[in-house]
Each structure stands twice: as C-alpha cells, then as structure tokens.
Amino acid sequence: MKYLFTILIFLVGLKAPNTQKESAFQKGEWFKFKMSYSGFLKAGNATLSLKEAKLKGKPVYHVVGKGWTTGPVKWMFKVKDRYESYFDKETGVPYKFIRKIDEGGHTKDIEINFNHKEQKAIVNNKKKKRVRTITTEQDVQDMVSMYYYLRNNIDPASLRKGDEITTNMFFDEENYGFKLKYLGKETIEVDVNGSDVKVKTLKFRPYVMAGRVFKEEESLTLWVSADKNKIPLKIKADLAVGSLRADLVEFRGLKHSFKIEF
C-alpha cells in the first residue's frame, strides 16, 4: 500500500507532439479515485484538485493531490500523502513542488523550487534539514505538473499502436526518464458519478523497474479518456505481492464534455 498514490499520480502523464493549443483543463477541476488491492479489498482514496493562484507575482495553477488508506487496510498500513504543484498557466512549467507523506511511519517532507533558466532544482529536505541544488533535464516536470502539462500535448491522431512515448521528470532528488508504450484504443465500462457508462479510451503500457514493488517491467496498464479532457479512468498494477487498481469514481469541473458511448 505504500506506493498506492505515488503510482496513481506518476502514471497519468503522456507525451506526444504539441499540436493542440486549446487547454484540456480549467480551474475548479476535481477528481476522486478509488484504490483497491488484489481486486476486492478497498485500499484507499485519492483526489486531485486544481485552482488558480499567484506565486511571487506570477499567475499559476495550484494543484493539490491527496491520498489515504481506508477500511481494514488503514489499520494494517496507514497512508496519508499530500502533493502540491505550482505551475505556469501559459507554459505549464513547474515552479514549486511539495511532497509531504506518511506511509506506515515512513515520512518525507520535501519542497522543490525550480530555476528553469539555469536548469536547476533547489531541493529542501525538511525532514533531514538539508538543502541541495541539482541539475535538471531539459523541459523537466514534477510528478504532478507533468500530468496537466502533458494533457495539453497529447495528440491522439499522431499515435500509432506500438509507439513508445517518453518524458522527463524530477522527483524528490533525482531526474527520471519515463517511457510508455501505446497499445491502441479500447472502449471500457466505468462507474463514475454514480452511473455505469462505456467510454472510448487510449490504452498504454508504462515501463517500470521490476523487483521489490512491481512484478515485472510491463506490470502496469493505463486507460485515458480519448476525448479532449484526456483524464485517467483506470490503472492496473501487478505488484510483487498482489495487485493494485485505481478507478476514477467522481469528477467535476471538466472543461470539455465527457464523452460516453451508447
């Protein structure tokens, strides 16, 4: 359960040529996900909310992501995570990222400020009382801003089955290269806002490191709505022990209509 919210937020960004100018989202957007373990045991919930703010005089979007365990799992392994990102309203580049988590007693309290001109990340590890300056990759995103930035850059028309999609991300104190394989389109059934509906999706296979957490390199599958919103609808992960699933169950404030199949 330690990785339930990290898995969710890490996987919802997809990179493609920047051909779409219209934003895929707007202030007031909100999502809620239900997490389940091994297909039947409810593990927890996660939410993402988006609002407008100002950071050092710059107009930005401020995203807050929260994740927590529920039910029996909460008593076996308590998780309470909070992620925040401040990113530019026009370009999508991140300025500030916050990660404050408590996962079964494993805690982190990290704040990252980005200097894109010098390609540096100033990492303030508040728990260890240590500040480091680390060189970042070009066009780097944090793990939350990546989702919103790349939603504006997905071009479904340019994707072909088997395409491999890459992106750069900075997380905690490291640069990460992340790769996904496009598996094609698929219509799936989802239960959102209290209704069972069929939705056309883009299906992806993210590559991960096999070992202690994931069963193998291709242990993850991700379904994203094929409409203009490009929101994550379902994630399945085969773990070293058991499996984890995240399902979108509630949303509000979408900029575009949520398209369903009849």
Image: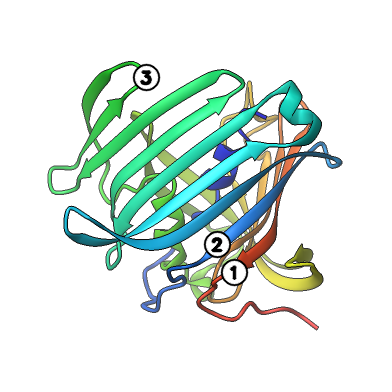
According to the image, label 3 marks what residue? Answer: 127
Q: Residue furthest right?
A: 40
How many labels sit on residues? 3
Q: Are marks 2 and 3 in contact (CB under 8 Å)?
A: no
Look at label 2 and name its amino acid. Answer: Trp
Q: Residue at x 54, y 50 (%)?
A: 180
* Residues at marks 1 and 3, CA–CA distance in whole angstroms: 35 Å
Q: Residues within 10 Å of mark 1 (few under 14, many from 20)?
A: few
Q: Residue at x 73, y 37 (%)?
A: 70
Instruction: Pick the quarter of the image with the N terminus.
Output: top right
Q: Please give left or right for residue 80 compared with residue 191 in the image.
A: left
Instruction: Pick the quarter of the image with the C terminus.
Output: bottom right
Q: Are marks 1 and 2 in contact (CB under 8 Å)?
A: yes
Q: Residue at x 54, y 19 (%)?
A: 106
According to the image, label 2 marks what residue? Answer: 30
Q: Is residue 121 visible in this depiction of the protein?
A: yes
* Residues at marks 2 and 3, CA–CA distance in whole angstroms: 30 Å
Q: Residues within 10 Å of mark 2 (few under 14, many from 20)?
A: some
Look at label 1 and name its amino acid. Answer: Arg
According to the image, label 1 marks what residue? Answer: 252
Earlier in the chain: of badge 2 and badge 3, it is 2
Q: Nearer the viewer, residue 243 or 34?
A: 34
Q: Residue at x 63, y 55 (%)?
A: 32
SS at mark 2 in the image = strand
Look at label 3 and name its amino acid. Answer: Lys
